[in-house]
Image: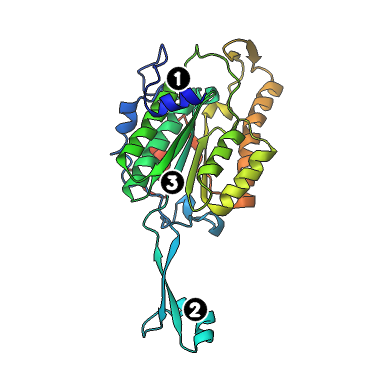
Amino acid sequence: MKDRAARIRTGTLPKAPQVSEDPRIHADLAHLRSLEGPARGLSFLPRQPARSVLNGRHASRLRGRGLNFEELRDYLPGDDVRSIDWKVTARTGRPHVRVMTEERDRPALLVVDQRMSMFFGTRRAMKSVTAAEAAAMAAFRILDQGDRVGGIVFGDALLAEIRPQRSRAALNRFLTALSEANGLLHAEAPNTEPIGLTQVLRAVARIASRNHLIVVLSDFDGTDAETDRIVSALARHNDLILVPVTDPSAGELPAGMRLVVTDGTLQAEIDTSTTATRQALAEMSTGRLAELFDWQRRFGVPILPLSAGEETLPQLRRLLGLGPR
């Protein structure tokens, strides 16, 4: 697995056979690079429009860049009294202020799910494509606003890490890893035990110990009790944004259909003519979303839900409080 991840980072992994050129099914490198222009206007800075999901309840606000201590000096007329260091003032008998400067940039980590569970779509595109497009646009905007950008791209049997850097080269490595991982998704892909979300979040915690912007784009399949604990820790020390990617069929499964589903080895038939079957499938999807909204309630984590049934850019603009383009 490590060998494959390294080859994805360097772009030396051979392309998977039968990869579709349809951008709704596979997001190649050229398509991801073409999203730089359309993404202009998006912002992941702390100052958000009034209608932005990231500017809602206080607990969901982005904390933004941190502050660095620069110097301790005598108080001068015009200084903000809130910057007075009262302990030093009491010790010296003269008013002193702490001078702080805003950090020049804030590292961002984009965590993108490209497992086989994401290779599904009934309308506009595959969930994997929607996640890849949103991640690419976010990467372009984060670098453009002066912050470091990196990412973790994970599939069923790979996990590629790109450390945050303020460089175009790091952005290109991230897009390359994303396009290569997306290209490995196809109907004849070997059936393997997928990487669990908890394992991925452990890697996130190792890279982003604190003061990072972390954006997780996934269908959040395969969570457990440890996932809850790691999400809590990440949210305490970083700005964590969850982007659940769903397909419209999850809540609107039509009646009277006989569906054949497969994992590449075994297959099963699902009859949607019964109310119980449709209800069970709907509850599986809503239960996953309910867990995310529970994290939002308990940890103050903002959620930006995306649907694979709509164009990605208009959804992001709407969620970030921007008008139609």
Tell which circle, 1 or 2, labels the residue nearer the N-terminal end: 2
Q: Where is mark 2, residue-wise?
A: 85
Q: Residues within 10 Å of mark 1 (few under 14, many from 20)?
A: many
Q: Quadrant of residue 73?
A: bottom left
Q: Is residue 312 visible in this depiction of the protein?
A: no
Specify the color scheme.
rainbow
Helix or strand or loop: what does disc 1 sit on?
loop
Helix or strand or loop: what does disc 2 sit on?
loop
Q: Amino acid at mark 3?
A: Ala
Report, in whole angstroms, how far the alpha carbon at label 3 lies from the one at label 1: 25 Å
Q: Amino acid at mark 1?
A: Leu
Relative to 24, 197 lies left or right: right
Report, in whole angstroms, how far the alpha carbon at label 1 lies from the one at label 2: 57 Å
Q: Amino acid at mark 2?
A: Asp
Q: Where is mark 3, residue-wise?
A: 108
Percent of width and height locating residue 314: 39, 39
Q: Is residue 152 above or below residue 293?
A: above
Residue at 54%, 80% (x, y): give it. 87
Tell which circle, 3 or 2, labels the residue nearer the N-terminal end: 2
Q: Is residue 256 visible in this depiction of the protein?
A: yes
Q: Are marks 3 and 2 in contact (CB under 8 Å)?
A: no
